[in-house]
Image (tube, grey):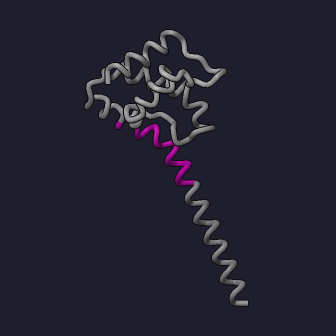
């Protein structure tokens, strides 16, 4: 009887811990973009890439890439914090191998130009 009660309490504890973890992750996900906004501006000013060009490139990555990446490759969602670190992969996939964006999503000539200019500036 005591053993079953301990097992039940352990199961409840695990369920509570998972619920807390998921709520933290959900809150972090929604507030992350707000807190990253300030970080992004500070970081953007600390490198040589013009902030407007970097913001335009991020906008393209968010609209044309992140919509698919969030579903299929959540570890490659682009943010201002990580986009420069992933620049070589972006260049290779978009301009060299032409694997991205995936079929069904297209980049306009202006969007290609903006991404290329941003990549060249970093």
| 79 relative to 39 in the view: left or right | right
Q: Main secondary structure of the magenta part?
A: helix
Placement of the N terminus among the 4 image quadrants: bottom right
Q: Which residue lies most toward the top here?
A: 109
Q: Name the residue rendered at 72%, 84% in the picture.
A: 4
Q: Is residue 34 magenta?
A: yes
In the image shown, does 12 or 76 lie closer to the viewer?
76
Q: Which residue lies most toward the front here?
A: 97
User: Where residue 21 sits in the image (x, y, percent)?
Assistant: 55, 58
User: Where residue 106 sits in the image (x, y, percent)?
Assistant: 59, 17
| 49 relative to 83 in the view: left or right | left
| 84 relative to 108 in the view: left or right | left
Q: Which residues are magenta?
A: 23-39
Placement of the C terminus among the 4 image quadrants: top left
Q: Is residue 30 magenta?
A: yes
Q: Name the residue rendered at 53%, 51% in the picture.
A: 25
In the image shown, does 54 or 38 lie closer to the viewer?
54
| 122 relative to 13 in the view: left or right | left
In the image shown, does 30 or 89 lie closer to the viewer?
89
Q: Is residue 8 above or below residue 34?
A: below
Q: Name the residue rendered at 46%, 38% in the picture.
A: 33
Q: Is residue 56 above or below residue 109?
A: below
């Amino acid at each position: 009887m005591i053993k079953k009660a301990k097992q039940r309490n352990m199961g409840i504890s695990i369920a509570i811990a998972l619920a807390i973890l998921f709520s933290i992750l959900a809150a972090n996900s929604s507030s992350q973009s707000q807190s990253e906004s300030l970080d992004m501006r500070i970081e953007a000013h600390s490198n040589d890439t013009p902030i407007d060009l970097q913001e335009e490139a991020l906008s393209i990555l968010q609209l044309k890439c992140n919509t698919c990446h969030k579903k299929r490759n959540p570890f490659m969602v682009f943010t201002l914090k990580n986009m420069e670190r992933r620049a070589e992969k972006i260049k290779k996939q978009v301009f060299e191998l032409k694997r991205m964006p995936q079929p069904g999503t297209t980049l306009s000539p202006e969007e290609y130009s903006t991404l290329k200019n941003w990549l060249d500036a970093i």
